[in-house]
Image (cartoon, coloured by chain):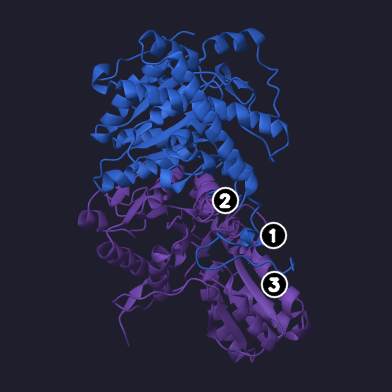
Chain colours: A purple, B blue
Amino acid sequence: MGRVITYIDAITEALDQEMARDERVFLIGEDIGLYGGVFKATKGLQKKYGEYRVIDSPISENLIVGAGIGSALVGMRPVPEIQFADFVSPAMDQIVQQAAKIRYRTGGAWSVPLVVRICCGGDVGGGLYHSQMNEAWFVHCPGLKVVMPSNPHDAKGLLLAAIRDPDPVLYFEHKRLYRSVKGEVPEGDYTVPIGPAEVKKTGKDITIVAYALMLVWGMEAAEKLEKEGISCEVIDLKTLLPIDKKTILESVKKTGKALLLQEAPKTAGVMAEISAIITEEVFDYLDAPVMRLAGLDVPPIPFAPPYEKFYLPTVDRIMKKARQLKAY
Amino acid sequence: MKVAYEKPPSETPSEFGLSPKEKKELYYLLLKCRMFDERFRKLFRAGRFAGTYFSAVGQEATTVVPSYKLLPQDFIGPAHRELGCNIVRSPLKVIAAQIYARANSPDKGLSHPCHYGYKPANIITPASTVAGQSVLAVGVALAYKIRKEPYVALAFVGEGGTAMGPWYEAVNFAAVHKLPVVFIVQNNLWGESVPARLVGAFEDFSHRADGVGMPGVSIDGNDVLKVWETTAPAVARARRGEGPTLIEMKTYRWYGHSEIDPADYRPKEEVEYWKKRDPIPAYEKYLMGNKKLTLEEKKQIEEKIDKEIDEAVEFAEAADYGPVEWVLGDVYADFKADAPDRP
């Protein structure tokens, strides 16, 4: 058994090791220096690397990302932080019109090796402005890569891969997983490649596709369902753009049934795309309609504790939906 | 025009005096900008290239002069009316090819006419969200500061773009960190069709600098030497690590926002007033008065430019559009986009 650490410690370790390895890497964001980040993801880094490698920015999200992009144009490896995914909207122009398009609009002459760390996710009592899952906004932007780890091993490996990637990567980290999920993480250098999904559990009846918190809850549901005689194959998507179609389609061809989990509101989410891919490409293998279990189509996420529980695709709801799908 | 708010630059102009040879070169560049621009307006109306054309006639001094004598590592973040920056730093053929969107364009025809950019010139191809490149310029300046390199970034924007929130975030951050960047606000009185009076509650847009603790100065942007004497010290100051400067240059866009805009929202008298304040004849008069330019030399310069433009147009027109497969490349470094329904 190797060393076991939390999801957030894996992130901090990746940042620390990459800053030590590559002097082009710097961080910029709100409360990340003196305070070490509102969740302490950057704890101790400003003291270690100085205030121009861990820059405490004003409340200026457009600038946080845009300054990162500009610096990347002249050879830096910036890792700006968006404190809460809900606050990424002021930076949309820089992400969508600059980062995503610069390689394209310059005919490949310039590139933007940038990683925007975005803290996201619910089940933390964060309410309307500290819980959002808005990854789908960016999955609609060719030119970006979007990743979202569900465990500490991938959190470190995907972050290192993202910083070394020649293109802009949005790295979503789920705050509910920061300290609730622990796992084995190598102490040394390694990367988890951007792109491939991973079969976390094999099964024969249903393919569950999920990422981040939904993956964790999907796995929990799958273990319980196993005892009821329902065998689920669980795929951790890990990279949302580009989508690893092959891993999903091979699994669905085997099981004939797909249950897609999504924490964000249901309409036009990432799983709508996965559903379309499945029906377009392996329709003949399906034994049931593709089913989605997602957040509700309301502004995410209503605050009062019973409201939040009502909103979320909980383990019980996943199990119920899986039973429906099995019985179809 | 009134220039009510003017702080003197910290250096005396003589420190940044141009040699007679440089003054003549500046004249050549200004004239080249004007002649190229007028030629391309005609070419657009003759249907020789697609899209539209954004003329910068009347605004040559505000783009050509600040771009002159920069270092190759200095960066320029333009919008779409900064032809002059490119005239100084990029080959004319490259500029023409960009407008024609042919295979020999630096952007391979993927961007839009007048979205000039050229990596060897360190000018980034702009997005149309006009203040965006000012934010990028601040990021470039931040990199130079982190690396302790003596280079600067120039951020060009119109008075219209200064109303954008992101521009304010950029100037504020640059001031806080004394970044090596010079913000050049070309106030041409019109943001497409919206007059400057509906954009700022003052006549001098250099007031935008007051709120962020940055030196700001408003000058006559059609006075070539004034532009030089203001910009050069600001660039030198930035290069020394003493921080950013905002320079408002009052100028005028002679024609429409683009060639499909008749610009009939502007009073005729205003257009005529500004055409009389044309930066190029005024500078020419200065040079001739000081015996730094003769009529004969002027004629030779014009002939030389005409020939260069002819060659640039030939270069662009001789090329084909790129193959459609190029649409799928340059999205990512490591893979191409799919096109399953485009056999």
Q: Which mark is residue A267?
A: 1
Of B203 and A166, which appears nearest the observer? A166
Does the rendering let one see residue B211? no
Residue at x 55% of width, y 42% of height: B127
Label 2 element class: loop
Q: Mark 3 points at which residue?
A: A277
Q: The residue marked by circle 1 belongs to what chain?
A: A
Looking at the picture, how far across and down is residue A243, in whole percent? 59, 70
Which one is in front in this view, the residue at disc 2 or the one at disc 3? 2
Do marks 2 and 1 share a subunit?
no
Vertical arrangement, residue A296 with respect to residue A99, above or below? below
Label 1 element class: loop
Looking at the picture, how far across and down is residue B197, in whole percent? 56, 16
Q: In this view, does B141 lie to the left or right of A294?
A: left
The mark that comes first in sequence, 3 or 1, is: 1
Tell me the quarter of the picture where residue A287 sits: bottom right
Q: Name the residue under label 2.
A: B104
Q: Label 2 vs label 1: CA separation?
A: 43 Å
Residue at x 66% of width, y 59% of height: B323
Of B69 and A285, which appears nearest the observer? B69
Q: Label 2 vs label 3: CA separation?
A: 37 Å
How many residues crowd around disc 2 within 10 Å: few (fewer than 14), some, or many (20 or more)? many
Do marks 3 and 1 share a subunit?
yes
Vertical arrangement, residue B145 with respect to residue B189, above or below? below
Q: What's under tag 3, amino acid-wise?
A: Ile
Q: What's under tag 1, amino acid-wise?
A: Thr
User: Total of numbered circles in the picture?
Assistant: 3
Residues at circles 2 and 1 in contact by the CB criterion of under 8 Å:
no
Which one is in front in this view, the residue at disc 2 or the one at disc 1? 2
